[in-house]
Image (cartoon, rainbow, N blue to C red):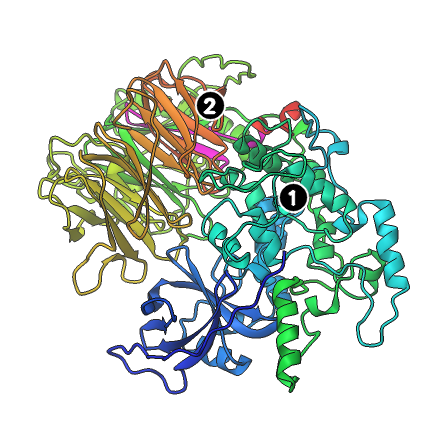
Amino acid sequence: MTTPHRSMDRPTIHCIGGEEPTPPGLSQLIRMQKPDQLVLVTLLCLSLARLLFELVLQYSDHLHGKWYFSEIRAIFSRRYLLQNTAIEIFLASRTSIMFAFQDQATVKKVVKVLPRVGVGIKYGIPQNRRASLMSARQLFQASNMTQKWQRREISNFEYLMFLNTIAGRTYNDLNQYPIFPWVLTNYEDTEIDLSSPNNYRDLSKPVGALNQSRREYFEERYNTWDNDQIPPFHYGTHFSTSAFVLNYLLRLEPFTTMVLALQNGKFDYPNRLFSSVKRAWDNCQRDTSDVKELIPEFFCLPEMFVNMNGYKLGRLEEGEGVDDVELPPWAATPHEFVRINRQALESEFVSCQIHQWIDLIFGYKQRGPEAIRATNVFYYLTYEGSVDLKAMADPVMREAVENQIKHFGQTPSQLLMEPHPPRSSAMHLSPMMFTPLPDDVCMIMKFLSNSPICHITANTFPQLPLPSVVTLTANHHFAINRWNSSYAGIEGQLRSKKLASSSASSATSSQSQQGGPGGGGSHSQLQSGASTAPMKPPSTQQHHPTSTSSTSQAPSQAPSYAESQSPSPGAASLPLAMDPILAVVTNATGHQVRRHLGDNFSQRVVMRHSCFVVTVDSRFILACGFWDNSFRVFSAESAKIVQIVFGHYGVVTCLARSECNITSDCYIASGSQDCTVLLWHWNARSQSIVGEGDHPTPRAVLTGHDQAVSSVVISAELGLVISGSTDGPILVHTTFGDLLRSLDSPEGLTAPLNIALSREGFVAAHFPGGHVVSYTANGYRLRHEVHNDKIQCILLSRDGEYLITGGDRGIVEVWRTFNLALLYAYPACDSSVRSLALTHDQKFLLGGLSNGAVVVFHIDFNRWHHEFQQRY
């Protein structure tokens, strides 16, 4: 399939002005490449606060773009036509824009006046303009992502996306689309065993060299090449081109429209369309003009395999119609295929050899003698630095070279000149068969208020000055409990039991001298272990922690949380220490005023987890449910109101915060009885809700509900807001306010009580009567189950693979999300579980109980991973 080149007459250009002056020399004509290969001429204007552009098309009205500098999160240098003349700007709204300039000098000028954000904060690289101008190799050397991947802190998928990003691959240019490997070879059997090495591809070889006879053909071509003008090569085609990407995604818009535009309004010949996974793999093994790899969507987007719009794609030569992509027999649905393909990508077989594939695509085997030895040399015009377009005086020759570069593949920037280090073995990092399993319950902390803990936020990042766990109760009290980042796990647990036992003995002696357990004691209880008889979970080994307790003396003065304290020996070996301010009563009524949010809440609003939001640094608490239709921002240090935000015409019933890091802004979503959801911008610098002017204003108004909104979740990374209402559907909006779809609830189910959303796009909803439903964010219902417990709270793991629930029976349970299979049940607590939270490393699970206690559970999701089950 060839890609015709389109050109257009140069349009009239208008600069969009602003109130602020434009820096001199930065009103720049730009060539912007749209994904459908249409090259547009536009004008970029950089004001002191905004980035603006206008482009004019022959067949449409003016199209405008405006982005505020405060929304910019990362700036990368990019290539256009293998020349380093472009930049890509990533925004807080999850979108990105790519601009191609006339020369590299203009790139430097533009970066110089843009915000000093570098390439973001995810990669451990300082946020400065120098980072935005770094080469791909410099970014790789300066980042900490390889070490994270080796330590298995990030997945193979995440690491490959990182390598693609810094190597110049982008979703904004189909010629430089991200590249992923074929990992499986078995597309014929009715069942597939992911523990068998026979089902995996040899990742040390390029696709073209997997078949020995075909490899010999390519090597003979290279060795017998005789052309003085063109260097020898193995492959005249490439592993990634815009045509290959469009062929994979032709069933989805806007790619369908792009395919039709490239084929003069018709689909390509049916036998050349992507119609079968097995056929695509077979072609990569026998066709000398097909050596393509995969794209990320094979591991995360089941919808690409479904002809949901009913396009008439023709018939194969055998007479079979082309419709949905034919899947392997071992995958009953596209969702199952993507799930198994993703499992294979994260398998130990792939983990131990994926570094060799990285060497071929991004590393030292990409070019030079090592590439020749690996049968991995492509046509010379696919490599960076092979041609200087500016030096070409002949316009005809230049256009021919540009077309070659555009349509026949571009090799990523080379990241390494030496072998990529392998990933550490899971057994090396965590030798599970030699390590005793920790107790399920590592501690219980009890507040004497006995008010239900209806909200928990675990801000346990070690980069924080004081990692903490914030708890809020139904009577509007809160606590900032210190998290022990150096908690030593099993060894520390054994020490804590000994210390707790000795503390309990001394406390008993002290109480007998003072006339009873209440005399001079503290206002809290710390317990190491479970206080109730544990329930035997189904098909699991049960651990019975020792039940001990300790009581500590209340300090004479309440130290501020921000002050450094030397914890007692017993507390040092526990993961959580109670907020010290709660040890002192400061008024006659007994309310700790520095930890109380007041009594202005509407009596009609039941305090739930979704009524509160805590900032990532634990310095501010946002609460809703006030009678004046506002939600309020409280200082966690003093419990004073620092901001009152109005915008709704009914009582605000729920709040949600998008994921964010320690220093970045985030979204706040508020749902109300007025049937709307408002999206707000929390500014980390001003530490408040901000808007266009001096007063906070919503960024978007989300409509579609006709009943009071009961729950809401938001993900800035996915750009989605998901909300449910009383007697209404679950709606999915974008962060721009556009309604995408409603999630199909089982018949008779309305009014979701809780909604959870993972960063991978899995959605879980809990309805009255114990009904639990799991979805994908694209609207596909995965599973519906009915639980025999009255569920109070739900939580998804970071990757969405596991769902955690807690309810009135006091049992915390772990489920597999895609089929809602019950995997594990923790020991029963002595009261209802009202709230749940995971620590940043997902090693501890915190549960808030209705009797005012916080339980800290050990959790290790590996125990339910299909590869590690036999090791537990």
Give x and y (percent) for residue 287. Answer: 76, 48
Vertically, is 660 above or below 45?
Answer: above
What range of the chain is rendered magenta?
841-862
Residue beneath the point at 58% across and 35% down: 321
Q: Quick check: can you spot residue 581?
A: no
Q: Give the image quarter of residue 418.
A: bottom right
Give the camera-side residue of 758 and 84.
84
Q: Quick check: can you spot residue 618?
A: yes
Q: Is residue 528 magenta?
A: no
| Residue 820's disc number | 2
User: Helix, strand, or loop for circle 2?
Assistant: loop
Give the camera-side residue of 327 and 473.
327
Vertically, is 96 above or below 654?
Answer: below
| Residue 705's disc number | none
Q: Is residue 85 left or right of residue 531?
A: right
Give x and y (percent) for residue 761. Answer: 44, 40
Q: Give the image quarter of residue 193.
A: top right
